[in-house]
Each structure stands twice: as structure tokens, then as C-alpha cells.
């Protein structure tokens, strides 16, 4: 795994759950932050065009409360999603955020390195999270992720399919169509190439808990650092996926305990272990430690029987 990029001395650590919250609903800000590991206050699609000025006013007042040492924890867990770089709303959004205590900004519908550069110029020192959710954004993900202010990259399926002229990102069984799977992989690889965290897309079917659990488990296994969500009920399912099972954690710790006794590849519980598998085990332990630090509740879960 590549070393995570730092921006202004900070590394992206928000996650594994990022909960969207409309910026025009200030009464939900605190609740969303309490429910999830991080909150995405959305100035883009979640807010109707006539309501955007009021949403910016609400957000300005909220960000003012985060200034100072007392707001450090919440600042690190607050992301503001702004409008695409080629829109008038973009300029209004960055004018609002310039000089504010905001630390993480998500740029909707990022399609080029120039889009990222425009956000970086307007918001120097802020950690940027480009959202690659169009055909152009997906195909240019590697260029987009290369900017030194990018700390994470997210992808989105629904706007991607809309940009292609399609009508559905998923098949009848809930699995992504091939073009969405390709875009998902491209964005993750681009993020990792440049030391940025990968944020997996939302799961739109709130009632499909089985589908979300399976997709979150795949996100963990594939290397996504976090997964976005749109409803508080999705948070526990994603956290559960990121917390190793008791069996997984025991296996990882036992394997790592054997590493000092071997100079190279070795056999462990009937399987050959080399450096990549050692790195896998280290990641399992890191996920367990992260889950433990984020909650006083037990970090492991029992595998379903």
C-alpha cells in the first residue's frame, strides 16, 4: 500500500463511514456527525437551486462554530461537497469556504486535472476529494488524483451512467453493470497510485441491507478506505464490514507473530505466506485498531453461522 498523502500536515483518516447531509438542513448537521465517522455537508445535488443561498448561510454559521481548538475533532470529520468547477455555483461555494476553518472539500463531477487545480487555487491548503462520477472523470481519474492537494478520491455510479446516456448502473440482481465496475476499479487504482484514499460510492437502496453488506465487504477486501452512505441506518452495516471478525483478527495476529522467526516466505497453518500476505494481515490489524479507537464497543463481530 502506498504511503498516504499529506496536505498541510494532515492525512485523510475520516471513515470508514461518510454520511451525506443536505446543507440546507442545518438541524441535521449534528445528528449526522454523531451517527457516522464523518459527515458530507452537501451544497450540490442535495440542495435545490433556489435554496442554495440559504444553504450557504447555514453552512457559514456552522463552520464558524468549528473554529478554534474545541472544533478540531469535528473539523477533521466534516467534508463539504461543492458544485462542479464549470458552474457559477462553484464560485459561490468556494467564496464561502475561502478563509473558513474547513479542512476537507469534495468537488462534485470532477472531470479533469484543471478542475482540481481551480479548486486548489481557490482553497489553498485544503484537502481535496475529487468525485469522479462522469465518463470524463472516470477515464481521467489518474490525472485527477495526481494533484498534491488531493487526499482522497470518490467515485459515483448514477451520474456516471447518466453521462453515458444509460438508465441504470445495476443489473436486476443488484450487481453493478460492467461499465460501472470498470470505473470503480479505475478510480481506486488511481487513488492508490498517488497515495490518496479511495471512497466507495453510496448504496442507493436503503432497504436492501444484504446488498449493502455484501458491497461493503467487497469494498473492504478491495482496499477502499471508506464508503459513503445516504441514511443513518447504513452506518452500522458499513462499520461491521470494516471491523474484522474475531477469527480474522486472531489469524492475522498469529501470522504476524511468526514473521520475526522467518527470513522470507514460510508456511503457516497449511498455507505459504510471503510479503503480500503479511501486508494483508497488517491491514486487518490496522482495521481492528481503527474500529477500536472509533468506538468503545467491541471491534470484532462473529461470523454469521
Image: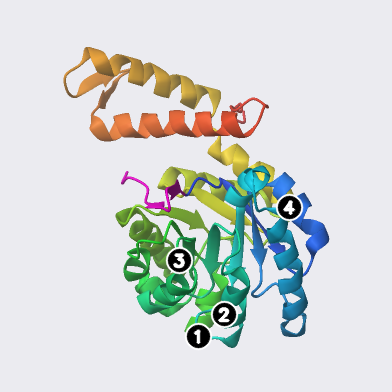
Q: Disc 1 to disc 2, how far (Cα)?
A: 7 Å
* 100 drawn magenta: no
Residue 124's disc number:
3
Are dots 4 and 1 in contact, CB under 8 Å? no
Q: Quadrant of residue 116?
A: bottom left
Note whether residue 156 is visible.
no
* Category of crowding for the residue at label 4, using alpha-carbon neighbours closer than 10 angstroms: few (below 14), some (14–19), many (at least 20): many
Which mark lies nearer to you, 3 or 4? Answer: 3
Task: Name the residue: 19% across, 24% down.
Answer: 265
Along the line of sight, the residue nearer the viewer: 290 or 207 = 290
Are dots 1 and 2 in contact, CB under 8 Å? yes
Q: Disc 1 to disc 3, how far (Cα)?
A: 19 Å
Q: Is residue 134 left or right of residue 194?
A: right
The magenta segment: 1-11
Task: Return the residue at label 4.
Answer: 32
Q: Disc 3 to disc 2, how far (Cα)?
A: 15 Å
Task: Name the residue: 73% across, 79% down.
Answer: 53
Amino acid at each position: 500500500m502506498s504511503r498516504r498523502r499529506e496536505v498541510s500536515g494532515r492525512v485523510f483518516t475520516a471513515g470508514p463511514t461518510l454520511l451525506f447531509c443536505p446543507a440546507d438542513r442545518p438541524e441535521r448537521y449534528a445528528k449526522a456527525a454523531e451517527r457516522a465517522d464523518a459527515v458530507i455537508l452537501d451544497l450540490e445535488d442535495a440542495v435545490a437551486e433556489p435554496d442554495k443561498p440559504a444553504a450557504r448561510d447555514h453552512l457559514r454559521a456552522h463552520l464558524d462554530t468549528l473554529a478554534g481548538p474545541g472544533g478540531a475533532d469535528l473539523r477533521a470529520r466534516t467534508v463539504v461537497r461543492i458544485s462542479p468547477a464549470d458552474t457559477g455555483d462553484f464560485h459561490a461555494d468556494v467564496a464561502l469556504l475561502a478563509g473558513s476553518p474547513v479542512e476537507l472539500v469534495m468537488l462534485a463531477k470532477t472531470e479533469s486535472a484543471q478542475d482540481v487545480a481551480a479548486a486548489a487555487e481557490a482553497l489553498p491548503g485544503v484537502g481535496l476529494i475529487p468525485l469522479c462520477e462522469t465518463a470524463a472523470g472516470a477515464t481521467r481519474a489518474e490525472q485527477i488524483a495526481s494533484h498534491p492537494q488531493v487526499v482522497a478520491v470518490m467515485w459515483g455510479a448514477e451520474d456516471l451512467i447518466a453521462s453515458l446516456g444509460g438508465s441504470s448502473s445495476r443489473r436486476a440482481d443488484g450487481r453493478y453493470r460492467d461499465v460501472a465496475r470498470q470505473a470503480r476499479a479505475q478510480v481506486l487504482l488511481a487513488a492508490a497510485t498517488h497515495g490518496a484514499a479511495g471512497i466507495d460510492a453510496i448504496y442507493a437502496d436503503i432497504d436492501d441491507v444484504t446488498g449493502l453488506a455484501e458491497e461493503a465487504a467487497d469494498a473492504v477486501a478491495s482496499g477502499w478506505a471508506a464508503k459513503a452512505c445516504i441514511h443513518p441506518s447504513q452506518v452500522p452495516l458499513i462499520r461491521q464490514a470494516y471491523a474484522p471478525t474475531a477469527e480474522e483478527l486472531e489469524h492475522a495476529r498469529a501470522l504476524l507473530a511468526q514473521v520475526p522467526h522467518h527470513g522470507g516466505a514460510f508456511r503457516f497453518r497449511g498455507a505459504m505466506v510471503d510479503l503480500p500476505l503479511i501486508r494483508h494481515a497488517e491491514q486487518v490489524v490496522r482495521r481492528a485498531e481503527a474500529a477500536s479507537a472509533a468506538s468503545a464497543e467491541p471491534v470484532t463481530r462473529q461470523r454469521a453461522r
